[in-house]
Image: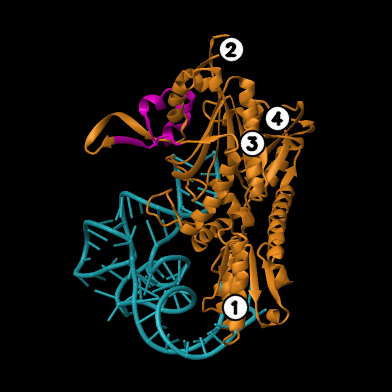
Amino acid sequence: MAEKRTEEKKAVLPAKSNFSEWYNELLQIAEIMDVRYPVKGLYVWFPFGFDVRKRTYAIIRELLDKDHKEALFPLLIPETEFMKEAEHIKGFENEVYWVTHGGKNELDVKLALRPTSETAIYPMYKVWVRSHADLPIKIYQIVNTFRYETKHTRPLIRLREITSFKEAHTVHATWDEAAEQVKEATRIYQEFYRRLAIPTIVSKRPEWDKFPGADYTMAVDTLMPDGKTLQIGTAHHLGNNFAKTFDIKYEDLKGEQQYAQQTCYGISERSIAALISIHGDDKGLVFPPEVAPIQLVVIPILFGKSDEITGACRDVADRLKAEGIRVELDESDERPGAKYYRWEMKGVPLRVEIGPRDLKNNAATIVRRDSGSKETVPLDNIVEEVKKRFEDIRKSMFEKAQRQLKERIFNCNTLDDVKNKIPDGIARIPWCGGRECGLAMEEAVGAGILGIPEGESGRGNGVCPMCNKETGNMAIMAKTY
RNA sequence: GGGGCCGUAGGGUAGCUUGGUCCAUCCUUCAUGCUUGGGGUGCAUGAGACCUGAGUUCAAAUCUCAGCGGCCCCA
């Protein structure tokens, strides 16, 4: 009977090996998202989840604010603007929600709920850009966007309302300068994900998979525990495609009118899906200290009445709070074990326990969420010991995640190899880069080509499995979300 | 886009095949009290549910249809 109860309690959160169930249950139990909102594809941020979002987005803001300006454009886009760019329309027309009525009156010009904001922003850029001295413009906004997804929706990953779309839109004088900005964007995103201890792969998307209306698309991907990759950032070189349709021109040094060159790049709450999925375990969430809503919980170990222990705990909590650490002192009337499980579910990076044994030695027990390691430290040094561990935790979380990603990139030479490895992760295979070959490869293995990765992993010597030509390019293939 | 499975308290479930024995089972949760306290303490009392609509029937959680919602597989 007692054993059975233990099993049932453990079964509250499904094992992470059952990723899909684990993910859905965790979002609910750990109070990230409430998935019970009665409209398909729309979900509710719990206050706790929203706190994680706030801290995560504070990082992206910090990184962008160095040389971008934050602005805010309207949610509604008139059909007349939305329909200007042919490629862009083709890419989004099946996913757009339309506002057709104001009260009982039908609108003369339908209004689109932005699926992305190019067509909301660029009519204004036409007005704002006059001279080369106005350039570059680097603006971002963090907004909700709407896409009528017909495939299966999934909280934080595939949504009909993306609640946390960070989109940047830049304007430059030259194509090369814009290309440099695209590189800069992927650098910013990698730094952002490094802070979240999430390893990434940057690659150039194949021609057939680029953003509608772009010259080319760079993408940032990561690997989820179930072996599928998740696109968690993109940067697009728009060339002067949109500048031509929206008539964005500047006067150059010689007094001639030139079309501007543009980029746009985005990140969404998929970043938080990755944060949760990559670090979480069978016990629940695991957060890097920087984004943890609660960074440390103090748990008194009481035997009968003990003002001494309570006092010591309060003192420690106060000292840590004074250092700006987000501390929770759990004096609730529960057994310590129950508290451990609860705070572990919430991903609190450090737990400090103080009981009679510790107090006798003027010490505290300090437990890491990521590794489970338990150590005794002197009470006098508690602040330094905690700070040191925060840095260790982020580092070792990143290293662990990097190791796990590396272990699941498989070098392949044949399409059969690829097919065998793809259920477990990412396949790396020579590819000539040609469209015909690429599409045939995707067809043959039933997975997508993410692209040719930046850096070493994108180079190698081999033959393209379709055309048998020698090539120095290595592509990566995977099942994608 | 095609196919399959499913919807019962806040969460997880039993009951549905063969309609009535169901003012609906069990676990968890929540509330109150006592007890307990270094990994989910125990006891007592109490609270809380058949997705929506239409239909069949003397009778629907159970059968039929539609809607809404969820999950899985294939393209």
Q: Residue beneath label 4, please?
A: A466
Q: Are marks 4 and 1 in contact (CB under 8 Å)?
A: no
> Chain B takes which shade in the image?
cyan
**Labels 3 and 4: the sequence-earlier one:** 3
**Quarter occupied by the N terminus of chain A:** bottom right
Residue A65, horizontal then vertical, whole percent: 57, 39
- Asked if both marks, 2 and 1, belong to the same chain, the answer given is yes
Q: Residue beneath label 2, please?
A: A253
Residue A478 visible, this orientation? no
Residue A443, horizontal then vertical, whole percent: 61, 35
Q: Amino acid at mark 2?
A: Leu
- The mark found on residue A186 in the picture is 3
Subunit that carries the residue with mark 4: A
| Closer-to-camera residue (A90/A171) | A171
What is the magenta range?
Answer: A72-100
Q: Is residue A76 magenta?
A: yes
Crowding at dot 3, Cα within 10 Å, few <14 / some 14-19 / many 20+, comes out as many
Q: Name the secondary structure under disc 4.
A: loop
**Labels 4 and 2: the sequence-earlier one:** 2
Q: Name the secondary structure under disc 1.
A: helix
Residue A310, horizontal then vertical, whole percent: 58, 79
Crowding at dot 2, Cα within 10 Å, few <14 / some 14-19 / many 20+, comes out as few
Distance between the alpha carbons at the discs numbered 1 and 3? 49 Å
Residue A108, horizontal then vertical, whole percent: 27, 27
Subunit that carries the residue with mark 1: A
- Asked if both marks, 3 and 4, belong to the same chain, the answer given is yes
